[in-house]
């Protein structure tokens, strides 16, 4: 015979309580993956922009060419004398949430004569 009463449905209640926590953890992990992707992409774009700047080409165009389409919008590229280039991209967010900020990277190549 099984025990009835107060323990009926306890597993269901525990599962319902656990699901939002599991969803929040998965969302946080996914957002961390998006941040890492944006950081990596900004770094690659900064290196490409610095190489372009070193040979006299357009660093902004080179940076955009090395970014995924989703990160191209809102990219900021700044170059300085001496070959340093800084790139900032907007970090994508999960739907319905604001962007957590910008991923920034810089690179330096000596200008070529």
Image (tube, rainbow, N blue to C red):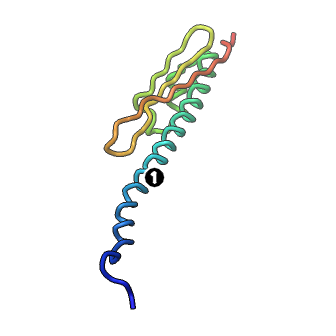
Question: Residue farthest to the bottom?
Answer: 1
Between 2 and 35, the one nearer to me in the picture = 2
Numbered marks: total:
1
Rendered view: 26 above or below 44 = below
Instruction: Give x and y (percent) for residue 11.
Output: 39, 72
The residue drawn where x is 52% and y is 32% is 65
Instruction: Give x and y (percent) for residue 108.
Output: 64, 18
Look at mark 1 in the image and give the residue it sits on: 26
The residue drawn where x is 50% and y is 22% is 60
Rendered view: 92 above or below 109 = below
Q: Secondary structure at mark 1?
A: helix
Decide: few, some or many residues near mark 1? Use Cα within 10 Å; few <14, some 14-19, many ≥20. few
Q: Is residue 73 left or right of residue 38?
A: left
Tell me which corner region of the image, top left, top right, bottom left or bottom right, holds residue 99. Answer: top left
Tell me which corner region of the image, top left, top right, bottom left or bottom right, holds residue 21. Answer: bottom left
Between 47 and 3, the one nearer to me in the picture = 3
- Quarter holding the N terminus is bottom left
The residue drawn where x is 51% and y is 44% is 33
Instruction: Give x and y (percent) for residue 78.
Output: 50, 16
Q: Is residue 3 left or right of residue 109?
A: left
The residue drawn where x is 45% and y is 23% is 76
Between 27 and 19, the one nearer to me in the picture = 19
């Amino acid at each position: 015979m099984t025990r009835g009463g107060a323990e009926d449905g306890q597993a269901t209640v525990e599962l319902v309580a656990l699901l939002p926590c599991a969803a929040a953890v998965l969302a946080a992990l996914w957002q961390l993956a998006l941040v890492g992707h944006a950081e990596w992409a900004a770094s690659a774009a900064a290196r490409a922009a610095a190489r372009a700047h070193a040979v006299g080409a357009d660093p902004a165009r080179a940076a955009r060419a090395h970014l995924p389409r989703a990160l191209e919008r809102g990219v900021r590229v700044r170059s300085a004398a001496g070959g340093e280039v800084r790139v900032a991209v907007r970090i994508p967010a999960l739907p319905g949430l604001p962007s957590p900020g910008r991923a920034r990277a810089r690179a330096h190549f000596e200008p070529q004569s």
